[in-house]
Amino acid sequence: MMKKAIFIISCLSLTALVACKKGGVLDQVKTTDLNEETTFADSARTLQFLTRIYTDIGFSAEPKRFGDGSSVGIYSIGDEVESTLQSASAYNIIFQSGAVSALNIPDDAWVKTYANIRRVNVLLKHLPTTPLSAKLRSRMEGEARFLRAWYYFILIKHYAGVPLIGDVVYGPTDEISGKRNTYAECVTYIENECNAVATLLPPSYSGLDYGRVTRGAALALKARLLLYAASPLFNGRADNMDGVLGYPSFDATRWTKAARAAKDVIDLNLYALFDLPTQPGYGFQKVFVTRKNNEYILASMAGNNRTLESMWDPPSRTGSGNSLPYQELVDAFGTVNGKPISEDVKSGSNPTGYDAANPYVNRDPRLAYTVLFNEGTRLNVSRTVSQVFTYVGAPQDGYAPNAGTRTGYYLRKMCDDNTIASTTSSATERCFPLIRYAEILLNYAEASNEAGDIATAYEQLKAIRKRAGIVAGNDGNYGLADGMTKDQMRTVIQNERRVELAIEEHRYWDVRRWKIAENIANKPLHGMKITKVGNTYTYELVTVRTPVFTAPKWYLWPIPQGEVNKSLDLQQNPGW
């Protein structure tokens, strides 16, 4: 039976201090009156308890997810960036080298989620008797239940079906069954919670309440949940472990349901793509450093910060330069005409096509806002904008296999044009995106296409590409070919998600739910070795890493072995 270790006791406890009293006798002195009774008898403390549950909302997507100060996020263990952390114990190396096991898998997706689920249940237990107004209690119930659903979703995307505990609050010595619910039961539970809390939550907030979960966030979580549930990894699995790993039978109507859920978010008419048409694609850049905007549906709130500039900017900009995009990510961005670089080649009749001798010109504007490439520009320590050079032998930021940038690139996504790591610059109003309206449009496009409604998929992609600064073209299709089949559109949508949502915790999970990871994650990942010859450059593709992926077991994470050891009922995922 699982004991209390599977669920961390919430932060409320009695604390003690050893102090020296008169006469030299050491006694314990009570320094706080905090316990469950006193906390929920006080309005401010009740609100603070809810705030604590919010604190971990972004942990799964945060840039420093794995380990204290390690600066390694989920983007570093897939095919997006190479981390400068190269020790055998670094999580990016453990994942990329195939050294992952149930003994060394990060336990945050299990421990942090269940700890917060327990906190929600403690809050819900006491909420009816708190000295809050009925209106505020209702809203807080909606917030808490949303957060519980959010943490359960993090669990099932890592592990598939997990134990559902309802509203029960287990004590330190209670025996708790670790029996896993089926994937279908988990999806139904989260979906029902989203539906229920949508009626309790307001459409928006203002003032100090801005950033709390809204009705739109509840519906958007449901849309993401149902998209995952309809996807090949879960929608019909022969090796379903009695339904724990997914639906035993494929059902195409799950795509229709997912499309409808995304459309429900759109129909709220509360959100839009953040657009600043003064410069092509600039809205795509500016949205990430604008705290209050109409594209973020859910964000991990933060005070003014230089977090990403400190981590991702190159040394010449006082950053650590610790996340280096692979060439595969760079190549995923098409031309400004919205076409793949392999198809839209520069010629006398096509002057804005891709030019291998000048590869970063006439590209999708999102490339320059995602990747810092050779001769790309960034603010410098003199607070002026100047070029960054990544060629072999370039000062500070140049290409080197074991120093500088081993891929020829630095990461720029979500960095502020007016901020660098140095305190000589101002911090930026950055909140980290958890659900953006752009994702909802892409979810709608994907689910609609899989349900046979290709026309709807076209419309969502055109909206995304218009904001990105892609040229509309004479046909107004923004580079999309006419008359695509479902399979062709699927390929386009998958690539569009890769470029629009890069470094936002989507790519890693997308290739798994699509069941294409085994075709992607075993291939060499490359960088670009750039050599300066006079006033020109030569470009050489170099292999940086060949990751390891073993199908089918690596489509899901193993439950940490320490948790499995606590319960005879807690069944490990297959192969681990």
Image: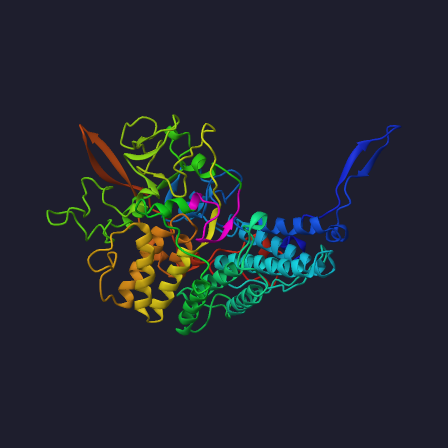
Image position, residue 559 (x, y; %): 53, 56
The answer to which quarter of the image holds residue 163 is bottom right
Question: Is residue 41 or residue 537 the one in the foreground?
Answer: 41
Image position, residue 71 (x, y; %): 47, 39
- Is any atom of residue 257 visible in this view? yes
The span shown in magenta is: 288-302
Q: Report the quarter where the N terminus lies.
A: bottom right
At x 48% / y 46%, what residue is drawn?
432
In the image as oriented, which residue stretches furthest toward the right? 23
At x 42% / y 43%, what residue is drawn?
93
Where is 367 relative to 120, above or below?
above
Whether residue 161 is in magenta: the answer is no
- Is any atom of residue 80 visible in this view? no
At x 42% / y 49%, what residue is drawn?
504
Where is 329 relative to 572, above or below?
above
Image position, residue 170 (x, y; %): 69, 59
Question: Is residue 155 or residue 98 the one in the foreground?
Answer: 155
